[in-house]
Image: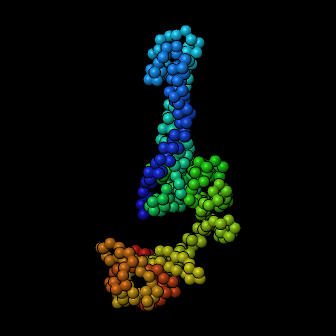
């Protein structure tokens, strides 16, 4: 699957606008005082009757030092005329500075901007670590249409730039920083995946996330198998040892390079193999392979044709077809014996 830019729903966009508006609340307050309250002060205090529009016009032009009402000998009016210009200048400068800061923060993926983006998310997934594993996880989740935000300690992480180019927010911070998870809106996250190369760091971040959000789903990448087992038992978290996951597949691949994946179902060792049909296998159809060898045909690809997922049982196998088969390892050995193979090929792509 190829990584896709994240799409934002209407509700997400509205939350995004709300998050931006919060950053300008002081500016909005100044604007309310300037254009909502001060015109009324002139309406009440000016010695001759004036309307709302004229009072508002006077306040507006006072911001530029150009009063539109005639001078009157009133201490209150004089005070307003003197105080409004600097007050208005402060309001304008505050708004401009905040806008400029957020604009450049967006360009540089600053923490403030990432916080705005994450604040607009609900049910998103936080990935800790933008290395090869983190990138692949983001790849898979993004392809499934999930909103993802990544936190990475090193600004020079190899895949961080690629994630940013595809509009996936990347916060450069230490996930163990107490404020880091808050910036990623962990309270509204669906899950957190801790996949750095630091076992204890992954556990600490996972526990911090659980403290902030008791309902969050925690998945950890751990190198120590015993530690992974203890985490699963004691912390209500999914922990996987990468050495165990990879070790089983690598071991079986050394016996037969066509085994592209392996996993356990209870006490059964399951394998997934890309098996090229020879003359013996060409005597069977998809159903016969399942009935005789327990082989579930996940896909079938004929030479020069597109791969067909879940071919129907009557589909006849032809010599040269490539089948992606899933079965127990002992069933796979029986299938190899049936095809007359004394030894597997040297590589997946040939003898």
Question: Image height check: is 339 above or below 158?
Answer: below
Residue 67 in the figure: left or right of residue 209: left
Q: Nearer the viewer, residue 186 or 311?
A: 186
Residue plotted at (44% across, 75% down) = 347
Q: Nearer the viewer, residue 286 or 162?
A: 286
Q: Nearer the viewer, residue 291 or 276?
A: 291
Relative image position of residue 104 (x, y in whole percent) = 49, 38
Residue plotted at (45% across, 15% down) = 68
Residue lying farthest to the left in this orientation: 304
Is the N terminus in the top left, top right, bottom left or bottom right quadrant? bottom left
Q: Give the image quarter of residue 230.
A: bottom right
Residue plotted at (51% across, 20% down) = 43
Relative image position of residue 147 (x, y in whole percent) = 49, 56
Residue lying farthest to the top in this orientation: 73
Question: Image height check: is 215 above or below 174?
Answer: below
Residue lying farthest to the front in this orientation: 49
Q: Nearer the viewer, residue 202 or 347?
A: 202
Is the C terminus in the top left, top right, bottom left or bottom right quadrant? bottom left
Residue 304 in the figure: left or right of residue 150: left
Relative image position of residue 319 (x, y in whole percent) = 33, 84
Q: Give the image quarter of residue 201.
A: bottom right
Residue 250 in the figure: left or right of residue 207: left
């Amino acid at each position: 699957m190829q990584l896709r830019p994240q799409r934002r729903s209407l509700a997400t966009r509205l939350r995004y606008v709300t998050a931006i508006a919060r950053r300008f609340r002081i500016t909005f307050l100044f604007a309310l005082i300037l254009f909502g309250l001060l015109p009324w002060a002139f309406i009440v205090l000016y010695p001759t009757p004036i309307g709302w529009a004229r009072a508002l016009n006077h306040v507006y032009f006072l911001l530029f030092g150009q009063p539109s009402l005639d001078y009157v000998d009133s201490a209150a009016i004089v005070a307003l005329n003197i105080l409004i210009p600097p007050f208005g200048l402060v309001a304008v400068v505050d708004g401009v500075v905040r806008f400029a800061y957020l604009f450049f923060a967006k360009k540089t993926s600053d923490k403030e901007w990432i916080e705005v983006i994450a604040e607009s998310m609900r049910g998103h997934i936080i990935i800790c670590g933008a290395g090869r594993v983190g990138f692949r996880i983001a790849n898979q989740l993004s392809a499934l249409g999930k909103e993802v935000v990544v936190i990475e300690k090193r600004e020079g992480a190899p895949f961080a730039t690629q994630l940013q180019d595809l509009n996936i927010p990347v916060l450069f911070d230490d996930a163990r920083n107490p404020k880091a998870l808050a910036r990623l809106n962990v309270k509204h996250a669906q899950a957190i995946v801790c996949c750095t190369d630091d076992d204890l760091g992954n556990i600490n971040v996972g526990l911090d996330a659980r403290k902030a959000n008791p309902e969050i789903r925690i998945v950890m990448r751990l190198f120590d198998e015993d530690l992974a087992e203890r985490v699963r038992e004691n912390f209500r978290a999914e922990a996987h040892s990468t050495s165990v996951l990879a070790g089983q597949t690598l071991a079986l691949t050394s016996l037969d390079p066509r085994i592209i994946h392996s996993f356990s179902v209870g006490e059964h060792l399951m394998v997934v193999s890309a098996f090229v049909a020879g003359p013996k296998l060409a005597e069977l159809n998809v159903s016969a392979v399942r009935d005789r060898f327990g082989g579930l045909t996940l896909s079938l690809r004929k030479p020069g044709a597109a791969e067909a997922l879940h071919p129907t049982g009557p589909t006849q196998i032809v010599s040269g077809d490539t089948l992606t088969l899933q079965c127990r390892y002992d069933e796979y050995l029986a299938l190899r014996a049936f095809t007359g193979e004394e030894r597997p090929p040297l590589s997946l792509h040939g003898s």
